[in-house]
């Protein structure tokens, strides 16, 4: 059994820094000697001393070396065959994944509301996407998970798919039935990729939803920095089975990565892994207990309803993650956007996400202390008093968006084609060159390569006029749209 209490890479960095090396290499501040005072204030001298370049004997050179050992310990902790540290977030993991999928085929079946980095990865890899819609919550207007039967249908429609990718858990803490989804993919002989950006902690407490690797996923993208406490931007890619070729993934990871890996980011992954493996259960247990109490208190506040077990009423939701406080604010008469703004301005408290109907506060693995929960609860209470709770208008159920336009080009072809910028209302019939996703529910209405229909354009316009917003368009006012040029 590997000793999860060790931090080989962190130790090697510290030993190197302690040896007071003569630094005549990069980075140019050379241990902080050449750093501007403002950088020293920002990062601290320690961070500058520990900002150590790649290719140093005893750190990441030699076989084995501490950097490799750190990744092996991470693979062991998460139950992976192999783990790669990523320095450009889970976004890099999604891009590398797309490049790897393109080695075994042309098409990728994807949950429609995958992160934008998957679409970017498809552009890089030239993949032909085929999309499956997640369940939409008609009351909250948010997207939940993909159902196994919907994956099955998408794979029937696209029998040449080389892999399928789903998202679980969601921003709102809903976890999919990953085991059944994996079975569906495997029954067709293809791997299931899970974007588990929001679930790096799941493996470390029995009360949490079963993690994707344990549920049979073949490749898992994990945003370790989101909940497990590594430094922002650091993430991991876990290989779960032989359905992907390790060597190809390795190449795809290095293709999407800097040649100057940051030692603090990598070191933070080594440290976060140790914390999760050694103390995760205890830390998560405390956080879960504190947030349970917070939910009860929040439910007693006027107009507020916390969404926890209620998520399980939705067919696509198999389990839910209690590290998210997803708060339905409809009963307050204000939108989630207004509530989040109020919290920020009145209580200097910042939540992770605001949508029309909800706000989502995120807690990290070891950050659910009573004092921190109290700060949020007091902030919400003060905000409700200051802004005033009003009888809400009757809110109509969320109307499902129109069908997606026909794909005429791959995202890559549309991205590389000559483009025109046309008035929004004149874009009907043209091929979109940029994505458009209205919130709620944040499922792209248009992706590059798809025809812009009148129905979709009207829907997007009405959604924005009705107080929603749209992501993806270069012109945020939606006066114009980028489309593929007619001779493109
Ligand atoms: C589902 C999902 N995947 C991937 C990412 C990208 O993660 P990162 O910011 O670590 O690149 C995000 C970011 O929010 C996400 O929500």
Image (tube, helix red, strand yellow):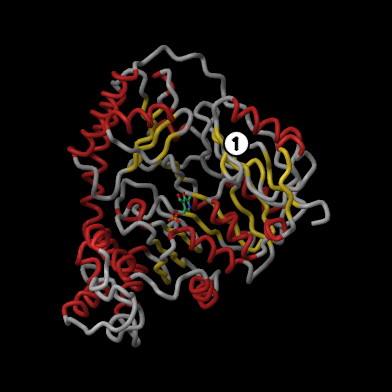
Can residue 467 be seen in this snapshot? yes
In the picture of the structure, the residue carrying the numbered disc 1 is 477
**Residue 427 as seen in the image, left or right of residue 229:** right
**Residue 374 as seen in the image, left or right of residue 206:** left
Tell me where residue 157 appears, x and y as whole percent. Answer: 73, 51
Tell me where residue 318 appears, x and y as whole percent. Answer: 46, 42
- Nearer to the camera, 20 or 79: 20
Q: Residue at x 56, y 45 (%)?
A: 146
Q: Residue at x 24, y 75 (%)?
A: 13
In the structure shown, which secondary structural element does the residue marked by tag 1 occupy? Answer: loop
**Residue 144 as seen in the image, left or right of residue 293:** right
Tell me where residue 208 appears, x and y as whole percent. Answer: 34, 47
Outermost residue, right side: 487
Q: Quadrant of residue 386?
A: top left
Tell me where residue 249 appears, x and y as whole percent. Answer: 52, 72
Q: Quadrant of the N terminus?
A: bottom left
Q: Residue at x 29, y 79 (%)?
A: 66
Can residue 7 be seen in this snapshot? no
Q: Quadrant of residue 359?
A: top left
- Nearer to the camera, 424 or 80: 424
Q: Quadrant of the C terminus?
A: bottom right
Residue 211 vs 20, above or below: the answer is above
Residue 327 vs 87, above or below: the answer is above
- Nearer to the camera, 37 or 477: 37
Residue 216 vs 463, above or below: the answer is below
- Nearer to the camera, 257 or 23: 23
**Residue 4 as seen in the image, left or right of residue 362:** left
């Amino acid at each position: 059994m590997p000793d999860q209490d060790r931090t080989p890479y962190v130790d090697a960095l510290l030993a190197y820094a302690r040896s007071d090396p003569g630094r005549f290499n990069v980075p140019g501040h050379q241990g902080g000697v050449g750093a501007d005072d403002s950088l020293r204030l920002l990062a601290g001298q320690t961070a500058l001393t520990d900002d150590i370049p790649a290719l140093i004997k005893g750190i990441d050179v030699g076989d084995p070396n501490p950097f490799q050992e750190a990744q092996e310990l991470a693979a062991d902790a998460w139950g992976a065959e192999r783990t790669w540290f990523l320095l450009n977030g889970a976004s890099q993991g999604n891009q590398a994944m797309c490049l790897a999928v393109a080695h075994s085929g042309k098409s990728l079946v994807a949950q429609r509301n995958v992160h934008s980095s998957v679409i970017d990865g498809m552009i890089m890899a030239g993949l032909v996407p085929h999309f499956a819609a997640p369940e939409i919550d008609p009351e909250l207007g948010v997207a939940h998970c993909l159902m196994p039967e919907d994956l099955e249908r998408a794979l029937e429609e696209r029998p040449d798919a080389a892999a399928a990718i789903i998202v679980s858990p969601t921003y709102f803490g809903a976890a999919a039935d990953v085991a059944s989804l994996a079975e569906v993919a495997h029954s067709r002989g293809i791997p299931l990729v899970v974007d588990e950006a929001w679930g790096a902690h799941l493996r470390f407490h029995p009360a949490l939803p079963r993690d994707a690797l344990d549920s049979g996923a073949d490749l898992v993208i994990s945003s370790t920095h989101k909940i497990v406490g590594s430094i922002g931007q650091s993430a991991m890619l876990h290989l779960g089975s032989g359905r992907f070729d390790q060597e190809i993934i390795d190449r795809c990871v290095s293709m999407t990565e800097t040649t100057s890996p940051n030692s603090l980011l990598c070191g933070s992954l080594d440290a976060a892994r140790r914390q999760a493996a050694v103390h995760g259960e205890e830390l998560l247990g405390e956080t879960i207990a504190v947030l349970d109490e917070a939910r009860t208190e929040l439910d007693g506040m006027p107009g507020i309803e916390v969404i926890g077990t209620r998520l399980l009423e939705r067919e696509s939701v198999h389990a839910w993650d209690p590290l998210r406080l997803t708060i339905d604010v409809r009963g307050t008469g204000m939108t989630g956007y207004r509530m989040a703004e109020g919290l920020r301005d009145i209580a200097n408290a910042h939540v992770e996400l605001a949508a029309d109907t909800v706000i989502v506060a995120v807690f990290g693995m070891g950050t659910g202390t009573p004092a921190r929960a109290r700060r949020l609860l007091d902030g919400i209470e003060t905000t409700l008093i200051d802004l005033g709770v009003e009888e809400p208008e009757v809110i109509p159920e969320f109307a499902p968006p129109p069908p997606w336009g026909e794909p005429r080009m791959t995202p890559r072809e549309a991205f590389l084609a000559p483009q025109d910028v046309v008035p929004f209302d004149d874009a009907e019939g043209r091929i979109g060159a940029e994505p458009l996703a209205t919130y709620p529910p944040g499922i792209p209405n248009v992706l590059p390569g798809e025809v812009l229909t009148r129905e979709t354009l009207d829907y997007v316009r009405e959604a924005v006029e009705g107080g929603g917003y749209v992501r993806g368009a270069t012109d945020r006012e939606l006066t114009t749209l980028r489309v593929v040029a007619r001779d493109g």
